[in-house]
Amino acid sequence: MKFLLKKEIILLTLCAFFLNACIGISADIQLNRDGSGKLIMEYRISNTLSNMGSLDGNASQPAIPLSKQDLERTIERIPGLRLSSYSKRETLQDNIINITLDFSNSQALLAYLDPESAKASISHNGQSGNLNLIIYNEPNSGFDENLIALMRSLYTDYNFSISFSAGGNSTMTITDGNGNAMPSPSSASVVNSGRKVSFSIGILDLLESKNGLGFKFNW
């Protein structure tokens, strides 16, 4: 019994790793001085993952619910948030979903990014402010090197990307999963144009990080 339990935990861990490894996420946060703005997101989901919902004979229940109807149900529960555009297309490798959300205040943005109000905070006075986000706060779980090598051979093009602008000069501090400043990972790409800051890292590099990942955006 103990062996079976341990084996089940290992399988669940590997499944979680696999699911994250074949998802790409891009988020562009555009914040106005009054706290309103836009959140533009793109999800790239491997067709392998999209089809996992059909393994039990029920293709109508995908592994990741990102249909327009599911998003609308989520948004309906958040005052000040509106879905202004939605599109979905399929390539040979991926399902690609693009959405644009308009938010009338910063709290609506936080409610969507962090429904549990545990990993994000924002403060602003119109002229300046800061947005703190914790993206990943689970340390490297010591995945098998052969598994990681396999994932890298299969899913090299899946990244996590985030960009931020707030109308004036914007800066970005990279943090660990506890919100403490740390150097940018060597595998990441960081761009600061003054008005917009952006960060990109491979999903597998993110999942292998030992300290987690977060951001402090200031303007």
Image: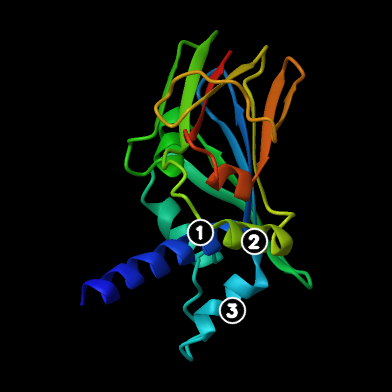
Task: Name the kind of residue labelled 3 in the image.
Answer: Asn
Tell which circle, 2 or 3, labels the residue nearer the N-terminal end: 3
Task: Name the kind of residue labelled 1 in the image.
Answer: Phe
Task: Name the kind of residue labelled 2 in the image.
Answer: Met
Q: Quadrant location of residue 5?
A: bottom left
Label 2 close to label 3 by CB (< 8 Å): no
The residue to which callout 3 is attached is 51
For the N terminus, the quadrant is bottom left
In-front residue for pair 155/86: 155
In the figure, is residue 177 to the left or right of 174? Answer: left
- Tag 1 secondary structure: helix
Tell which circle, 1 or 2, labels the residue nearer the N-terminal end: 1
Q: Residue furthest top?
A: 127
Q: Residues within 10 Å of mark 3 (few under 14, many from 20)?
A: some
Tell which circle, 1 or 3, labels the residue nearer the N-terminal end: 1
Q: Residue at x 69, y 53 (%)?
A: 158
The residue to which callout 1 is attached is 17
Label 1 close to label 3 by CB (< 8 Å): no
How many numbered tags mark residues here? 3
Q: Residues within 10 Å of mark 2 (few under 14, many from 20)?
A: some
Q: Position of residue 157 (x, y in %)?
A: 74, 54
- Tag 2 secondary structure: helix
Q: Real-space Cα distance between discs 1 and 2?
A: 9 Å
The residue to which callout 2 is attached is 151
Query: Which mark is nearer the camera, 1 or 3?
Result: 1
In-front residue for pair 196/147: 147
Q: Real-space Cα distance between discs 2 and 3?
A: 18 Å
Q: Is residue 202 above or below residue 90?
A: above
Label 1 close to label 2 by CB (< 8 Å): yes
For the C terminus, the quadrant is top right
Query: Which mark is nearer the camera, 2 or 3?
Result: 2
Q: Residue at x 48, y 59 (%)?
A: 72
